[in-house]
Each structure stands twice: as structure tokens, then as C-alpha cells.
Amino acid sequence: MNLRPKASLTEQEVQTGLKLVIGDGLAAEAMTTLTGGAFLVAMALLLGASNFQIGLLAGMPTFTNLFQLLSIWLVRRYNNRRAIAVLCALLARIPLLVVGLLVWTLGFNTSVAAVIFFLFFYYFFGSVAGPSWNSWIKDLVPERSMGAYFSRRGSYTQTLNVVLSFTAALLVDYVKKHYPAYELTTYAILFMGGGAMGIAGGFILAVAPEPASFLDRENMFRLLSRPLRNKNFRQLLIFNSAWVFALNIATPFFTVFMMKGLGLSLSYIIGLTILSQLSSILTIRIWGIFADRYSNKTIIAISAPFYITCIVAWCFVGIYSQLYANLILLAAIHIVTGISTAGVNLSLTNIGLKLAPREDAIVYLSANNIITAFFSSIAPLIGGVLADIFTQRHLVIDATWTSPRVHRTLHLVALHDWNFLFLLGAILALIALDLLGWVRETGEVKKDVVVRIMRSSIKNNLKDAFIIGHLITWRSQFLDMLRKKSAERE
């Protein structure tokens, strides 16, 4: 297998490479869907994981980003980003097979600590592969279409996530209901299947071409200090660090709250996740188009407040005991979350790529990942400790109406356990959002202007699709209706 970079790439090689990167993205998405998120939390809880261990599992993917320094050293040493990304990706995905085999063999005797141990190597090698992949893809994807490309790639991977996660959730709930003794075995199979798909994706990625690059052989620490000396990029680092800390205080415990606090089955949880994914799929390309046309910073400023509102809304889930009321609120939260996170995540990725100088991209992106990794990884650990502290604490605010014939009590606020974390996360995220104003991006357009343009564009698209479209096809629709009526009479 030839993993050497080329001095220059033809247009055909670039287009082929972009398709292969999407192929690897689909394989990696299948892997992370089956071995992460609700499935990992459910398996950990089944094995008896504590709140702190859940926080550790949530923080480990970002904590291991601290080892991205190794990626920079390897790129400087060998100047071959593709080889480093591919080999580390393959090494990262083998531990998933080991975890699956471990759970398959030992069952409930499997230690949560052992699962965490092997998953550390999964995240470790994945983190080492990350900077090489980011720098390589930055040079491969044309900058003028970066937003459109990653939004298209994101819509494909999210569609796969929807189909695969729902199918797996139905399988798990079916086994849990009819063959409960094999529930843990089912998770083991998911891990082995996810690991196999991830390894296949690594081989697909190995075929994608790499344009040659050169990394300055300056002292490592002096090299890493460059992003910190760049005032604008430093402001982005401050915002990113505050933002990820705020979110990771709360978000890792949403699934735990639904499982333990509300008693929802995995099918409900994955169904809500799919609802969020569908909302994201339907809007991510719109965000990508507007990010390319205006600025990523503006898209974050528009979408982030909606996400913060969703975190606040989690505080009101479970106030009433009726299942349908909680499901309606959860559905609304997940829909808005999907729409908002599509804009936030896409724009955060793109703005980092855009503000990083081409010749030092791997250094800037690694510095961003390493610094934000620290804040992102300690947040769920702090959240896990706080969740245990808040277990014995409640804050209830009611409104009571009393009359000769009526006595009604309306629950306004009922905070307990994880709800305190959600409120704290929302407050910290709101504070972090103010830091975005310090960042400067080329081609930046004011938020109010983009909101007005987006509203007008969406309104016109709806008008074209529903009003003008029906006017153009009214004759054929009318004739089809007559034919159906005639057929029913006969």
C-alpha cells in the first residue's frame, strides 16, 4: 500500500479523494454509532457504572486530545500525514473489538474499569490521528466549497446514524424484553461490529490521495506557541474552551437522566436522538450554504442561543409524571437541538480550519484541540461529582390556586439531581457566548442581516415548493383526483 504524498494533485484525484473521505466518514459513523452515545452509556450502566465513571467515559475522548502533540512530532519526523492518520486510525479501532470480546466472554463479570482502560487506547490513537487528518483534509478540500462539502458529508453520516441507531435500539429492546439474559451479549456484538466497520473505513481512507506539505522544524514548544501569539486565534481558543466546558458539564448526563430519572427504554431514547438527527440533516446544508456565503461566526451567533434554550428546557423535563407530556417536551427539545447543533458544530469546525494559516494548519488545529480538550474533559468529571452532591438536594417552586370548589397546584420549577447540572451548563454557555464577539472572521456579516436574509430565503423556498409548485401542477393533480374517483365508483 503506497501511502506517500504527491507534490500536486489533479482535479480528478481531488474529486476521487473527496469521495473516499466520505466513505471513511460513513464507516467511522457506523463505528461511533454502535459503540458510543446511548449504547455505551446503557452498557456501562448495566455493568454498574457510577456517575463519576459515566463522566470519565464522556471526558476521555477529549482528554486524550492532549496527546495530539505526538501527532505533530510524527508529522515533523516523517512528513506523511496520510500514513500517520491511517495507521493510527487502524490502531484506534482494534480496542473496540477487544472490548466486545471481553464483554462477550466475561459477561457481568466485566469490570467497568477494564472497559475504560481499553477505550482509553481507542481514544488515544484516534486523537493522534486527528491532527494529521485535519491538516490533510484542509489541503484536500477546496476552501471555497468547504462549508458545502462538510455539510454534505455530515448529512450522509447523520442519515446513516439515524438508520443504524434506530435498528440497533429496536434490536436491544427486543432482546431485553424477550431474552433479557442476552442483553449484555447484544452490546458486545455491537462493539465487535462497530470495530470491524471502523477498520474497514481505515482501509478506505488509505486510498485517498495526499498533497505534499512541509512543517517547520522549529522547537516544538515554540511552534505550539504560535497560535497563542496570534491574537485572533487566541480569542477563538478562549471562546472554544469556555463553550465546551459549559456544554460538557450537562450534555453527557442527558442519556443517564432519561434512563435512570425518567425510566425511558433505549428505543425511546434513540428515537428522540433520531428526531434530532433528522432535524440536523434537513438543516445542515442550509447552514453550510450561509456559512460559506457570510461567515461561520455569524452562524454560531444565530444557532447557539437556540441550543442554550434547549439546555434550559431540560430543567422542566420530569416536572409532571405523565409520560406523554414529557415525551412532547423531549421531542421539541431534540428537534430544536438538532437544528441548532448542526449550525454550531459545522461552523466551529470550519472557523478553526479557516483561521488556521495553511502552512501551520496542523499546529494551530492541534493547539485548539489540546487546549479545549483540557476544559472539555474535566467538565463531565466535575459534572459527575456535582450530580452525586445534588442527589440529596431539591428545589421546588409551585404556584397554587385555591377556591371554594377548585384546588390546583402548578409545578413551575422542580430541580433535583441532574437538573441542577443542566441549569448550570446553560448559564455557563450563555456566558461563553459573549466571548464570541472577540473573534474576527474574514467576510463577517452582522447577525441581524443574515437572520433577515435567511428568513426571506426560507420563506421564498417554502412559497416555491408549496404554492407555486401546486399552481404549476394543479391540472395534473386535478385529473389524477378525477381518475381515482372514477376508479372507486367502478
Image: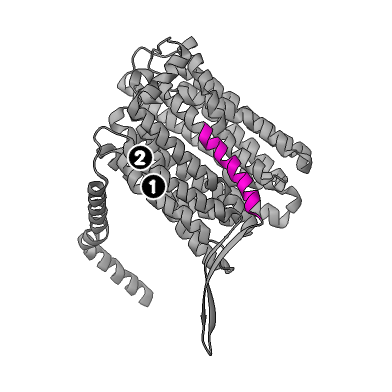
Residue 438 to residue 280: above or below: above
Instruction: Return the residue at label 1.
Output: 304
Determine the residue positioned at 30% across, 39% down. Answer: 291
List x then y, in percent, for residue 238: 41, 34
Badge 1 element? helix
Q: Could you tell me what secondary structure mostly forms the magenta stretch? A: helix
Does residue 180 belong to the magenta stretch? no
Q: Which residue is mark 2?
A: 436
- List x then y, in percent, for residue 10: 32, 19
Residue at 79% in and 40% down: 109
Picture layout, residue 415 above or below residue 450: below
Question: Which residue occupies 34% across, 17% down?
Answer: 9
Quarter in which the C terminus is drawn: bottom left
**Numbered label tally:** 2
Is residue 43 among what the camera can see?
A: no
Amino acid, disc 1: Ala
Labels 2 & 1 near each other (Cβ < 8 A): yes
Q: Bounds of the magenta span?
A: 374-391
Front one among 85 and 58: 58
Residue 137 lies left or right of residue 265; in this view the side is: left
